[in-house]
Amino acid sequence: MPAGLTCGPVPTPPSCTASGASQPASCPETSSPLSSGGWPPSRSSSEPGSCLANLAALHGLQDDFEFHPPDLLLFYNLTQVREANCRAFTRRAAQGDTELLANLPDQRVALQHVALACLGAPRLQLSASDLLLLGVLVCDMDASRIETADPRVLENLQRCRRLTATQQAALNTLLASSKTVLGPPGSWNLEGLRALGALATYISSSLWMQVQEAVGLAFFSSMVATYRAGRLSQRDARRFVTGFLKAKAASVPSRPKRGTDAGRPCIRGDITAATLHDDLFLVRYDCVQLESCLGSRVLKANLDPLLQHPLPAECQRVVKAKLAQVYPRGIPEEQLPLITSLVYLYSRSEIGQWNITSGDTVVALLASDVALENQTEAVLQKYLDHDGTITSSLLMAIGGSRLCWMSARQIQAIRPAEFRRAGALDISSCPQSRKDALYTKAREAFGSTGNTASYYRFMRPYLGGAPVEELRHLVQANVSMDIDTFTNLNPRVLQSLSVGNVTTLLGQNVGDLQKARSHPTVSSWLRSLNTSALGELGLDTDPAGPTGPARSTTEIPNTTPWAPHVAPTAHQLGNSAPTSGSPPAHLGFLPLAVALPSSLLWLLYWGTPGPSQDCSWGTSTKASKDGADPAPHAGKLGLVGGAGHLPRYRLQAQRAQPCPTS
């Protein structure tokens, strides 16, 4: 029985696949059939959804949308949504996570337009029933719609990853209107504020000034406790604390600013260990009092509980200055893991005073989401200067994004064997110069892979640095590149590819160009094409124009399907591992084996050989019409080809098909 199910490549390090060999600790465990994990995939990638949606559309399975996970519906060809199914489709799709469409901006806009069209006549105000239909799609709507919507829009906004500045203003306008279930700010209670969840972190200081003091303090205490327990992000906690303390400061008599009073007397009393465990510590001690009342001995013994508070930036600078007084020759290594929230304040020369000998220290410092470019490179360099080695475990622990800020010399210092064992690292956010360096390192690590299918699986995360020659090799190999990988290619290199190259390179995923046409990489390439070339791709002549389903907000798009080009190896399937450094997959739905209908599972397992394939899985002999040379290690592309990937579900079988008899 195969070990799982997937829609694309799982880069399992070569050192993890040798039978009979001892497995390195970093190797993924073998998963049981369809049981390891669940849908949806990691929130940083749209590859699995896009691939599965294209397969479903190709085989006419979109009408089974009621049985498909909501995240999958986000990627469907919206021109194939029948008018009779519009509301049911929208209601289910609106339960998904639109952040998965980060690389498909036009699809995201089209979803909102189709959803509004489903409502019928244009709405001046969204009703409660409208909001129930729109779900998470409200997160992409402008502030004016939020302000005028039924107050139950708060339930929709609670599902948003983040709010724009104008949406935050609209939220506060709505809360101040007294129309919500909370009532006027003066009557708010602890239970109502807690019910807001993360939305409470957006409440403005002007509203906090209207809240009863006892209620505000009780809520502040609960939010700090939530943060210290790791259930509130640093970003959200700091936003909340900043707004709340601003209101608190405005409600008390002004004090001398820092530096204007030479003595800066401690008014609140000396800070003790017990003081630091008080959830209202930041209310009782502002940054001026923190500087005046925090002694060196207490700081040295209680650095951890102090930094467990979501300190405002001014208070962080106070703590940094005091640490410099306590440790004039540099902070000891055993204390470094405690200051991750302060790392961004340190210069290269200050980090140069640190003593970093342990990989665990590096992981702790670079796990912080506030470290900047010079801190990352400086921290790693101190570790390397003490004979440290960048191992696969270290690479996986700090995540691919930290590779973006390593120097070219540090990247070169990574041993190929360690790079191989690290698996797929997400470097999509890296500047082009780092992508180029990491591509070179990946070629060094995976260049000797025995066949094209495996070579593509391992190299896919690093193709953003690939030269045009490499891409033409992949065109010849018919890999059916997913749209996420395509949008991360070097835009300048992409300009050298013809329409025929790109059509063959994307294969069954070429239709995703329509969904991603406003993405900078795709847009720049489309602008280089003439009208006939755009027509060949099935796109209209305005590269900046809307996608098909987004033409109107008052009528349902036509239901004529736009058939994507299918490459000869359109049904290559493979396996994919979770991207190192990515957020964990949320298991918000049933396992895929339960969530998908049997027809789609059958399709994903067996596939269908293309017209130019021979009798074994995925074999293709057709070349691009532009005549590229064979890819390095060219061979037969088996079931593990690359049309995007679905983490955790693996079908590692390669079954031969009987040749038809004439």
Image (spheres, rainbow, N blue to C red):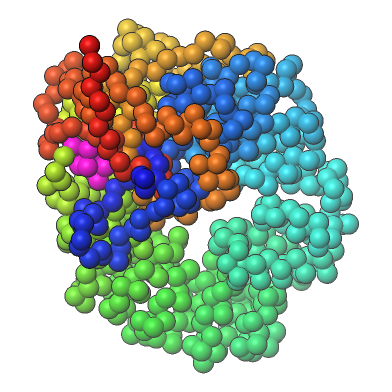
Q: Residue furthest bottom?
A: 297
Left or right: 629 with respect to 31?
A: left
- Is 458 within the magenta? yes
Q: Position of residue 200 (x, y in %)?
A: 71, 55
What residue range appears in magenta? 452-459
Q: Residue at x 43, y 38 (%)?
A: 48
Q: Residue at x 39, y 18 (%)?
A: 564
Foreground: 251 or 519?
519
Left or right: 456 with respect to 514?
A: left
Classify residue 572 by image quadrant.
Answer: top left
Foreground: 410 or 60?
60
Q: Residue at x 35, y 59 (%)?
A: 29
Q: Residue furthest top?
A: 532
Q: Position of residue 43 (x, y in %)?
A: 48, 46
Which SS type dominates the magenta stretch? helix
- Is 141 within the magenta? no
Foreground: 29 or 298?
29
Left or right: 20 with respect to 587?
A: left
Q: Position of residue 435 (x, y in %)?
A: 26, 45
Q: Residue at x 43, y 26 (%)?
A: 54
Classify residue 517 by image quadrant.
Answer: top left
Q: Please indicate, yes or no, whether residue 49 appears anywhere in the rendered image.
A: yes
Q: Residue furthest front?
A: 661
Q: Position of residue 134 (x, y in %)?
A: 68, 32
Q: How many numbered markers are drawn? A: 0
Please identify the quadrant where the N terminus is shown. top left
Please identify the quadrant where the C terminus is shown. top left
Q: Please indicate, yes or no, whether residue 44 appears anywhere in the rendered image.
A: no
